[in-house]
Amino acid sequence: MLSIDLLSIREQFNNNHILLCFNGPISRSLIEEIGNALKNYLQADNALPHAAQDVFGVYIELTQNIRHYANRMQYSDSEGSATVVVARNTEGNYLVLAGNQVELDDGQAVCQRIEQLAEMDKVELKKAYKTQLRQPRGEDTASGAGLGLLDVARKSAQPMVAKLVDTGSGRGFLSLLAVI
């Protein structure tokens, strides 16, 4: 039998104020169910309505991006699985972390985009969002790293952070952090 120290995991979750954690294949219905659980957790945590709405919106955006990317790349369930964590820090901010396997080139492009967004202030982010919103979108335009990430950056209290870890075979694990 596999030995897992669940108590240790629980203590780590409690010490890091983790409200929600998911790891595995992610579907549209699962995103919705976890989203409903997240709403309940935020309500139980007495989150301010605006903060709860932003945390939920960021969760939806990041998980849908993962799902769409996995579908577009035709990844298997295991290849397209997601890791999602929602926690609180000691300052009372919510942390939304999401990660998934990506092709290295794609991950590097997202990291570069996150770095560009991190250099913008709130006014510049709003202007970039409005500009992107007005751009025509063709049927063959790939989604990702556009309007949604701008929206996440606008909702974030601090610049978003991206990390790409090379896992071999031209792929990596991309992690994104938004602080709300």
Image (spheres, rainbow, N blue to C red):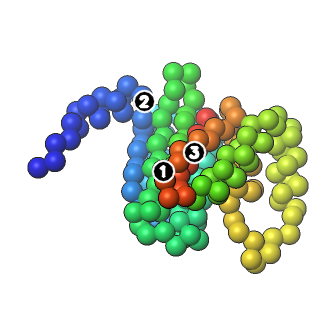
Helix or strand or loop: what does disc 1 sit on?
strand
Give the number of the mark in front: 1 or 2.
1
What secondary structure is found at the residue carrying circle 3?
strand
> Is 23 displayed left or right of 163 in the figure?
left
Please identify, in this view, whether the residue under mark 2 or under mark 3 is nearer the observer. Answer: 3
Query: Relative to residue 139, is residue 168 depicted above or below?
Result: above
Amino acid type at mark 3: Leu
Q: Which kind of residue does numbered mark 2 sit on?
A: His
**Is 9 displayed left or right of 46 in the figure?**
left
Local crowd size for mark 1, using a 10 Å CA cut-off: few (<14), some (14–19), many (≥20) = few
Please say whether residue 100 is visible from this viewpoint.
no
Give the residue at mark 2: 17
Residue 3 in which image quadrant: top left
Residue 132: x %, y % from top left? 84, 57
Tell me: residue 99, above or below residue 161. below
Who comes first in sequence, dot 1 or dot 2?
2
Residue at numbered disc 1: 167
Query: How far is disc 1 from disc 2 in space, using C-alphas?
Result: 28 Å
